Image: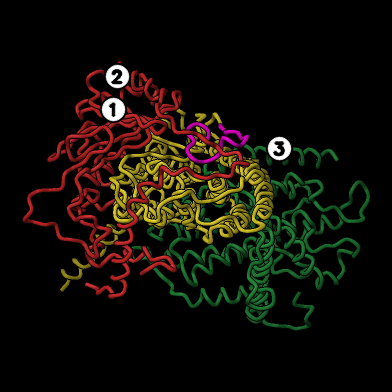
Chain colours: A yellow, B green, C red
Amino acid sequence: MSTTTENEQLAYIASQAADARVNVEVETDEGMTLNLGPQHPATHGTLRIIAKLDGEKVVTAEPIMGYMHRGYEKLTEVRTYPQVTTLINRIDWLGSFANEVPFILAAEQLMEVEAPPRAQWIRTILFELSRIANVCLFLGDMAVQVGATTPVFYAFRDREFVLNQIERVTGGRFHPNFDRIGGLKDDLPKGWIEETRGALERMKSFCDEMEELVLGNEIFQARTRNIGVIPGDVALSYGLSGANLRASGVDWDIRRDANVGLVYDQVDWKVWTHPDGDSFARFWVRLQETREACNIIDQLLGSIPSGPIMAKVPRIIKVPAGEAYVATENPLGEMGYYVVSKGDLTPFRVKIRSASFSNMSITPWILKDVFVPDIISILASLYFILGDIDR
Amino acid sequence: MIELLALNPSWWQETFLIKVPIGLLAVLLPAGTIVYLYLFKAISFMQSRLGPMEAGPYGSLQLLAEVGKWIQKEDIFPSKADKFVFAAAPFVVLMSTFLLVVVIPAGPDALFVDLDAGIYLAMAVSSVSVIGILMAGWSSANKYSLLGGIRAAGQLIAYELPLILAVVGVVIQAGTMNMQGIVLAQAEGEILGWGGIGNPFILTQFIGFFIFMIAVQAELTQAPFDMPVAESELVTGYLTEYSGIRFLLFFIGEFASAGVFSAIAAVLFFGGWYVPGIDAGSQVFNVIGPLVLATKTMLIAFLIFWFRFTFPRFREDQLQRLAWKFLIPLSLANIAITGVLKVAV
Amino acid sequence: MAEIPEHLLKRAQAARENAETNQPTSDQAPSETIEADSAVAVIEEEIPETDERAEEILNQILEGLGETVLTSHIAPGRGLWIRVSSDNWRQTAEFLKDELDCKFFDWLSVIDWMPSPYGRELETEQDIEPEQDTNEPEQMEWGYTGGDTRFQLICRLYSISNAAGIMIKADLDDQSPRVLSLIPVYPGANWHEREAREMFGVTFDEHPDLRNIYLPGDFEGHPLRKDYPLLSRRMKPWPGIVDVEAMPGEEK
C-alpha cells in the first residue's frame, strides 16, 4: 500500500517536472523554438514561421507555406481561357484586377489580337486603381505591425473611395473579372471620371496624412531604419521585384522598361527608388508609388480616347498554338503568366509567376540575427499576400 | 472624514461598510470612466469611427455588457498551466492597484490613511504588479506568454527607477513624502511672492512631470511601450491564455492603474484636490475635492490614451536604451538642479 | 455520380456544335484589322517581323556557349528561347549571369509535354478513364525550340541592363528527371526548385533542402504531371460545361 503511494507520488513529481520542461524550453542550449502562425495576428493569412530564438534574438527562421495552396496551375488546364480570369482574380485578392491583366495580355499575344485604345486606357486606369487599393492597405498595415493602431483605420476608410470606383465600373470590389480577351466587358459608367478625380484627391491627402503620421514618426523610423537591409544584388538574385527591388536601389520597373499592352508610355511619370534597402525604404517607396499612381490616373483620365472597347474576337475563343510570357508590374511586384497553348479551348500549361512567392523566398536569408519584433516589421515591409504566395 | 457623517462606527464597521466600498468605488469608477470615455469613444473619434453606439445612449452601457460577457465566459486553464499561480496572478496585479489608492488624498479629511511616507508606499506598491505579470507569463505554459512576462519584468524594473527619481524632485521641493503634505505645499506655495493660484509643481518640475508620464506609460504597458502585450508580435503576451473573469481582472487592473497613476500625477504636479480661490483648510474641499481630483485625473489620463493610440511601439532594446541612457540621467540632473535651487533660494 | 439534367446536356451539345460550325471564323478573326476611330491617337505599334535586339543577344549567347545551345527561337517582340541539354543547365545560367548580366532570377518551372491521358477534359461530361487497351499514346508535340523528352525544364532570367528576358529550356530524362540545382548561381532558385520537385518529381542535385513546399510531407504523386488525375473532376461532372450558353435569339 505504502509503495503504491510512494510510486504515485514519484510519478506525480516526475510528470510535474516533465510538464515544466515541455512548457518552457529555455534551459536547452539550442534555445527556444517559437512558432508564429499559421494562426497569428501578424501573418495576415496563414503563413507560418518557425523561429529558433536565442533570448529574443532570432537564430534561424523558416517560413512554411501551403496552407492556402489552391492548385491554380492545375485548374487552369481544365478551364477555358475566359474562365481562367475568375480563378486568377483570387491570387492577390487585394489587387484583383491587376491579376487578370497579364494573363489576358498573354492570351492576346498568342491570338495576335490587340485591344482597342480605349480599352487599353481603361485597363491601365483600373490597374493603377487596384494598385492604390492594394498599397493603401499596406501603408496602414505596416503601421499597425509596428504597433500604431490608428493609421490602419485611415487606410481602410480611404481605400473605400477607391474600391467604390472599381465597383462602379466592374461591379465587383475584390473580384471584378472584368478583363476580356480583346478588350473589356463594359464601358465606363456616366460621371465616373469626375468621381474618380474626387477619390484621387482623397488618396493624395491620405498619402500626406500617412507621411506625417507614420513616416515622420521617430519611433517608426527607429523601428524600420537599418532593419532588414537587402542589398540590390541579393534582391536581384532572389528574384525580388516591385517596390522591394526599387527600395534596394535597383531602378527597374516593368511599367517603364518592359511594358506590354498598357499605356504607360503615354503618361509622364517617375519611377521611385531608394538606396537604403531597409524596411523604411520599402515603406517610403510604396508611399511615393501610391502618389505616382494617382498622378498616372489623373493624366490618363483626361485623355481617354473614344472608340470601341472590344476588338473583334470569336465568341468561342481558341488560342493558336504557341508560348507566351507576359509580366506586369503588379502592386506586389512582377506578376507574370507563362501560357503554353496547343490550339485548344484550354491552356495546355500555365505557369503563374507571382510576386510574393519570390519576395518571400528571401525571408530565411533576411531573418537572421534580428529581434522578434523585427520579424514582424520586416515581413510587413516585404508585403506579401498569402494567396499570392500559395496560388 | 468619518467624523463628517456624525457617526461613531466601530473599527470593523468603519472598515468594511465605509472604507472598502468607497475604496472599490474610487478604483472602479475612474477605471470605468476611462474605458468608456477614452478607450471606447475618444479613440474612436480619432480613428474616424463612432465606437459603441448600441448599448445605452451613445453606447454608455457597453462596458456593462462587456463585463457581463466576460463573467459568462468559461474560465479556461491551459492543461499544462501551473494552476495555482495562473489563478492567483490577476489578483496580485489587482491588489497592487487597490493598495495604491489608499494613500491618495481627495480632500483635507477625505483620505484613507495619512502616511508620512505616502508617496514612498505608492512607489513601492506599484512595483508589486510586476510579480503578478511575471506569474501570469510563467504559469500560462505558453511561449508568447513567457516572452511577454519577461519583457514586462525587464520593462517595469527599468522604468521603476525614472518613476521614483522623477518623484524625488517633487519631494525635495515639497519637503515631505506625505501626499497630503505635497498637496498643501502646492496650495500654500507662492510663485515669486504671488500666491494667487498656489504653486503647482508642474511649473517648476515640468521635467519631472515629463519623465513621470513616460515612466507611467511604460509602467502601464501602454503603447509606445506595450511590448509585453504587443498584439502583432506576441498575440497578447502574458494575457494570451487568460479568458473570462480572470481576463476581466487584468483588464480592470490595467485601466484602474491608469486612473490611479493619473491621480498620483495630479496630486504631485497639479495640486491634487486643491483649486485656487478657496482656502486650502476649508471643509468645502471634503465635498468638491474628490470631484476636482477626478477631473484632473481624467485630463491626465487622456494624455496617456492619446499617446497610446498615436505612437508605434518601441523595440525592447530601444526601450531599455531610452530608460537607462536618457530618462535616468535626465531625472538625476533634475534632482540635482532642484536640490541646488532648494538650498540656494 | 450526380445526374446531369437532360436539358443542360442538350444545351451543352448544341453549344459544342455551334462552336464547331463557328470554327472557320475564329481562325480568320485575328487577321481582321480593328477599326479604330481615326480621330483618336492610336498607338499602333506594329509587331516587328524581326527582332534585332533579340537576335543580337542570341548571337552573343551562341558565341559564348557554341554547341551547347541545341535550338533557339525568337518570337519577335515577345522573347527569346534557347534550349540546352540538362548537363549544361547550371553552366548556361552561370554564363548568362556573368556575360549577359542576367542578374534577375525570374522563375523556374517544368512543362510536362505529354498530352493528358484523360482526353480533352473540358469537352467531356465526365472524365474518361485512361484507355488501357490502346498502347498508342497521343503524339507528343513540343512548343518553341522543340524537345526530345516529356519533361522540359524552363527558367526565365532577366537582364536589366540589356532589358531582355531569356527563357532557357532543358530536356529531362523521362524516368528519373534530375538536374543540377541553380542555387549556387541564384539563391532565389531554392523555392522554385522545391516547387518543381513536388509538382513534377524533378530531382535537383546539390539542393540542400528538397522538402515539399506546398503539399503535406507525406503527399504521394506529383500533381502537375499530366497523368495525375484532377480528382474533383472525376467525382462529379464539370458544371462549367453549360457555361457556353446560346445568345438570345440564337437557335438552341
- Secondary element at tag 2: helix
Q: Quadrant of the N terminus of chain B?
A: bottom right
Q: In the picture, residue B94 is in which quadrant? A: bottom right
Ranked by sequence position, the earlier of labels 1 and 2 is 2
- Left or right of residue B185, residue A43 in this image: left
Q: Identify the subunit bearing mark 1.
A: C
Pair 3/1: label in front? 1
- Secondary element at tag 3: helix
Q: Is there one chain holding both mark 3 and mark 2?
A: no
- Left or right of residue B290, residue B320 in this image: left
* Residue under pointer 1: C72
* Residue under pointer 3: B333
Q: Identify the subunit bearing mark 3.
A: B
Q: In the picture, residue B185 is in which quadrant? A: bottom right
Q: Is residue B195 among the parts visible in the rendering?
A: yes
Q: Amino acid at mark 1?
A: Ser
Q: Is residue B307 among the parts visible in the rendering?
A: no
* Residue under pointer 2: C62
Q: How far is disc 1 from disc 2 in space, using C-alphas?
A: 10 Å
Q: Amino acid at mark 3?
A: Ala
Residue B288: in magenta span: no
The 10 Å Cα crowd at callout 1, few under 14, some 14 to 19, many 20 or more, is some
Q: Amino acid at mark 2?
A: Leu
Q: Quadrant of the C terminus of chain B?
A: top right
Residue at figure coordinates x 29%, y 62% from the top left: C17
